[in-house]
Structure formats: C-alpha cells, structure tokens
Amino acid sequence: MENIIARTINLEKVYSPGQHNEVKALKGVTTEFRAGEFVAVIGPSGSGKSTFMHLLGALDRPTKGDVEIAGKLLSQLKDNGQADLRAKELGFIFQGFNLLSTLTALENVILAGDYAGLPAKITATRARELLTEVGLTERFDHTPAELSGGEQQRVAIARSLMNDGRLILADEPTGELDTKNSEAIVELLRDLVRKKQKTIVMVTHNEDLTRFCDRVIKIVDGKLA
Ligand SMILES: Nc1ncnc2c1ncn2[C@@H]1O[C@H](COP(=O)(O)OP(=O)(O)OP(=O)(O)O)[C@@H](O)[C@H]1O
Ligand SMILES: [Mg+2]
C-alpha cells in the first residue's frame, strides 16, 4: 500500500458541538489518494468540501475519525508534529492566492522555502527554477499587484512546490479566473502530477475542469456521493 499517499478514515467534523449553531459539516468520509493522481472534489456550496480539505491538510482537527498522510496518523501527532508534516509533505493553493503584497513573486516563493526549513543557499535558486517551470521567467521582480490573476496563481503554485511535498491541496484555485486562465492553471497542475508524481486534490465548482483530472469525488451534505 505504499502508493497510498493519504487517506481519510470515517472523517467527521462538527462545528460548535452542542450549541444552538452546531453544524455537522462532515458525516463520515472514508477515501484514499494515490501517489501521482489528480483528483477533483466537487459538490454543492456548503456541502463540506473546504472542511474536508482543512482536515486532510492538518489545518484543523476532526471531531471523529482520522487522517493518514505518508503513513502517519494525524491523531498520533501533537500540533508541532502536524506542523512538521505540513512543512515537509504538503503544499497549499487557495482561491485568492494569499501572496504577500509587499513582496515580489520571487520573494514570495523564497519565503515558502524559509518556512519549509530549506537551506538559505538553495532557496533562491530553487525559487527561480520553479517560477520558470510555471512560466513566469520575466516576472520575478513583480509584486502581486503587478501580476495578472493567472500569474498570481502561478506564483502560488510555485510556492506550493518549494518544499517538494508529495500532496498538494487546492481549494478553488481557479475561482477568480476566467475560462481560458482556469484551463491553463488546471493543465499546469495536471502536468505537475505527471512530471513530478505529485498527488493533487482540487476542489472546483467548475465541472468542465474535471476533464483534466484522473478521478472525481463528490461531497453532498457532508458525505461522499
Ligand atoms: N469555522 C466554521 N464554523 C462553523 N461552521 C462552519 C465553519 N466552516 C464551515 N462551516 C459550515 O460547515 C458547512 C460546510 O462548509 P464548507 O466551507 O466545508 O463548505 P464548502 O463545500 O467548501 O462550500 P463552498 O463550495 O461554498 O466553498 C457549511 O454549512 C458551513 O456554514
Ligand atoms: Mg469551500
């Protein structure tokens, strides 16, 4: 089973348990993701997709159930153990890019290398290589405001690759892009899966984009449909 990079086991999440505003956001999701696969997660608004991604990425803890990443059960790790795992194995790409506005494209990517604990000697070189791979050779010194939406998302993708983690989680990565740019970004993600044997899990509202993926899972009302 070594080609399974991540799995969720009966994953449940209740927000504000026992309170008047309690929400059962996930109601027992069991699934697995293999190395080198590009999986789309679809489903209606409010169905639990982002909740699922947060739990899968060790950004939040489940109410019940567990997540296994690279052979490690998250329930067995303390917060700093989970942070280490995130720094080593995970990349995140979200809607809205989350780039620091005062830093250039290159500095934004370098910063991710610092967070991942890469040696200072190699971060700048690696950041340039990754920005080149995502097609941004001539934009190293542009700040986010000086980049198009598609270009900003390419910076975010380069950033997510800095630690060379095996699992990349993308929540609506094309949510703010037009059709042409959305397809270009998803094709770029698909190429990363192929060339670098990454596993990418991508939430999307746009079912057209699922044609670039190997597999589609659907979450409806907190359960796999
Ligand atoms: N931090 C939170 N506290 C309380 N309730 C929350 C919280 N986050 C999400 N919820 C609720 O949990 C449910 C699932 O939310 P989630 O964000 O996972 O949906 P989603 O499928 O990502 O929706 P969308 O497609 O609109 O992004 C929703 O009913 C939402 O209101
Ligand atoms: Mg969401």
Image (cartoon, grey):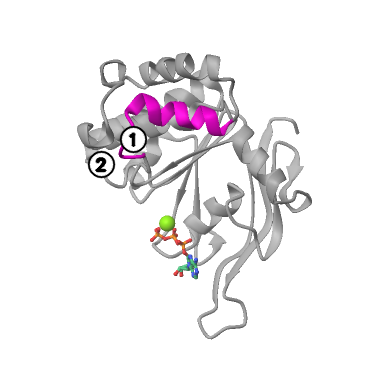
Q: Residue at x 27, y 21 (%)?
A: 139
| Side (left or right) of 116 relative to 103 | right
Task: Say which amino acid is labelled 2.
Answer: Leu
- Residue 74: percent from left, percent from top: 72, 49
Q: Does mark 1's beta carbon lie closer than 8 Å to ligand 2?
A: no
Q: Among all residues in the image, which is located at the extreme right?
A: 76
Residue marked by disc 2: 177
Q: Which residues are magenta?
A: 100-116
Q: Toward which corner of the image does residue 223 lie, by quadrant?
A: bottom right
Classify mark 2: helix, strand or loop.
loop
Residue marked by disc 1: 153
Q: Are marks 2 and 1 in contact (CB under 8 Å)?
A: yes
Count the labels in the image: 2
Foreground disc of the pair 2, 1: 1
Q: Residue at x 55, y 34 (%)?
A: 115
- Residue 171: percent from left, percent from top: 43, 47
Question: Label 2 to label 1, Cα distance in Å?
Answer: 9 Å
Q: Among all residues in the image, which is located at the extreme bottom?
A: 20
Sort mark 1 into few (<14), some (14-19) or many (20+) by Cα contacts within 10 Å: many
**Is residue 142 rendered magenta in the image?**
no
Quick check: 167 above or below 225?
A: above
Q: Residue at x 62, y 30 (%)?
A: 35
The majority secondary structure of the magenta stretch comes to: helix
Q: Nearer the viewer, residue 200 or 30?
A: 200
Which quarter of the image is occupied by the N terminus? top right
| Side (left or right) of 93 relative to 113 | left
Label 2 vs 1, first from the N-terminus: 1
